[in-house]
Amino acid sequence: MTRRPIVVALLVAVAGVLTLDLATSRPLDPFTAPPLLALGSGQASGGAHCASLPGS
Amino acid sequence: MSDTTLEARSAPRLRGRALAVLAALAAALAVAALAGPRYGALLLIGLGLGLAMEGLRFGFTGPWRRLILFRDATGMVAQMICIGLVAVIAFPLLASNPTELVGAHAPVGYAMIGGAFVFGMCMQIVLGCGSGTLVNAGSGNLVSAVALPFFCIGSFAGAYHLTWWTGLGSLPVAALSGNAGLALTLVALAAVAGIALAVAEPGKRMLPGRLWAAALIVAGLAILHLVVAGQPWGVVYGLGLWVAKGVTALGADLSGSAFWSAPSNVERIEQSLLTDITSLTDIGLIAGAALAAWWRDGLSAKVTGHPIQAWIAVIIAGFLLGYSSRLAFGCNIGALFSGVSTGSLHGWAWFAAAFTGSWYGIKLRPYLGLEARR
C-alpha cells in the first residue's frame, strides 16, 4: 500500500468532521467576527489555548 | 528523453500543483467569507506551517532522536534558533500590548512535569509530537494516522480530568518578561544549542540550508499567528475540542468536568470549529503537509508494516500523547515552542521532562516491535 489512500482517508475524515460541525454548531456570522488582526484591535484575546487553565 | 517529452510530462503536474494552490486559497477565502477574515488567515498560517514543516523536514521528535542516538545537533540547534527568533519579537509585543495579546503561560506542577515526561516518551514511540503527528498523518504516515484519533480522545480525556491533576500541586504561573527576561531566554536557548553542539559528532554540527529556511519561515508564521490570533501557536486544545463537540452532539453531558463546563469552553463547544484558533491551524497543518508530500513524491512511497503489538503500542501511545499534553499544558508547540518564546517557565520545565522521557521512549521502541533491536 502507498501513502495516497491514507492521505485521502484522512482528508475525507477531516471534511466529515467539519460537515458534522457545521450541522451541529451555532450558525456562522462573519459580520460579528473579530477583526483580521488581534494586534491593534483593542479587543482582549479570547481564544482557547493548551496552556490556559479552566475558565481563564 | 527529449525536452519536448519532459515538457509534456511536467505540464499536467504543474497544472495539478497550481490547482492545489488555488484550492487551498479558495478554502481559506471560503472560511474568511463564512466565519470572518481572522479565521481564513489562521487556516492559511496553518497551511504554511504544514508546508514548511513537511517540505523542509523541520520537526521536534526526529531531531531529539538524532541527537540522542547519533549525536546529530543540527535539528536541535534549528529549534533553538527558531524559538529565539520568535522570542525576540514576541517579548516586546506582549509587553506593549498586554490586553490584546497573551503568552502561553501556565503553572509548573507535579502533573505538568509528569505529563511532559510521558509525552516525551510517547512522542518517540510514535515518532511524532503534537505538530509532528498532524504533519506526519497529513503526509500519509500510517503510524501517525492511526495514532491521531486516539491523540484526540486522549486530549479530550486529559482536559476532562485536568483540574484533578492540577490539584495535586502546582506553583503559581511564572513568566519571564522585559529585556532581562528576553536576554535570559536567549542565553538559555543558546546554552541548549551550545550543549547540543558540544556533544555532537564532527560533521553533525553545521545546519543545512533547509533547516535555516525552515527556522526562519516557521518563526515568521508563529509571530504572524500571535499578531492575528492574539495568542501563540498551539495544537492540542483543538484536538480535544473535536471530541468534546462529537460527544456533546451524541448527547453526552460534560457538566461533570470543571474544564469542559467552564464558560469559555462551553462557548467553544457550541461555536463552529471554523472559529476555533487551534482547530484551524491543526487542519491547516494536515492539509499543508499533504500538499508538500504530494508535490515531493506524489504520495507514492510504500507504507511500512508492523507486528500487531506495535499497533497496540501506537494506539496506547497516541492516547497518552493527548492525555499527557493536557496535563503538561501543551505539547512541543503549546508548551515548549510557544511557552519558552513567550517567557513561560513551564516551557523550560516541559523541555527538561520531555527530553528525559524521550530518552526512555527511544529505548522502548525496539521492545514494542516498532524497530529492529540494536
Image: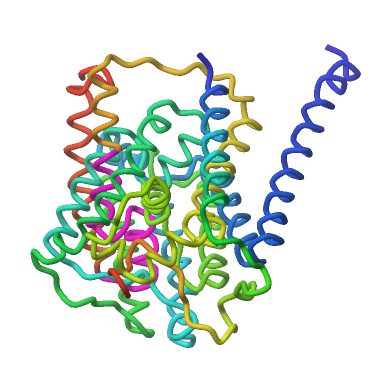
Q: Residue at the location (64% across, 25% down)?
A: B298
- In front of the other: B199 or B130: B130
State which quarter of the image contains the N terminus of chain B: top right
- Relative to B283, residue B294 above or below: above
Which residue of the protein is positioned furthest toward the left in this rendering? B168
Q: Residue at the location (55% across, 46% down)?
A: A18
Q: Residue at the location (46% across, 18% down)?
A: B303
Q: Position of residue B367 (x, y in %)?
A: 17, 22
Start-end of magenta stretch: B319-345
Q: Residue at the location (57% across, 33% down)?
A: A12
- Relative to B104, residue B311 above or below: above
Left/right of residue B49 with respect to residue B78 in the rendered view: right
**Which of the 4 image quarters holds residue B328?**
bottom left
Q: Position of residue B351 (x, y in %)?
A: 26, 56
Q: Is residue B210 visible?
A: no
- Tell whether position B327 is magenta: yes
Q: Is residue B321 visible?
A: yes
Q: Position of residue B258 (x, y in %)?
A: 24, 65
**Which of the 4 image quarters holds residue B108?**
bottom left
Left/right of residue B267 with respect to residue B122 in the rendered view: right
Left/right of residue A50 with respect to residue B302 in the rendered view: left
The colour scheme used to paint the residues is: rainbow
State which quarter of the image contains the C terminus of chain B: top left
Q: Position of residue B370 (x, y in %)?
A: 28, 22
Left/right of residue B209 with respect to residue B184 in the rendered view: right
- In front of the other: B341 or B335: B335
**Which of the 4 image quarters holds residue B200?**
top left
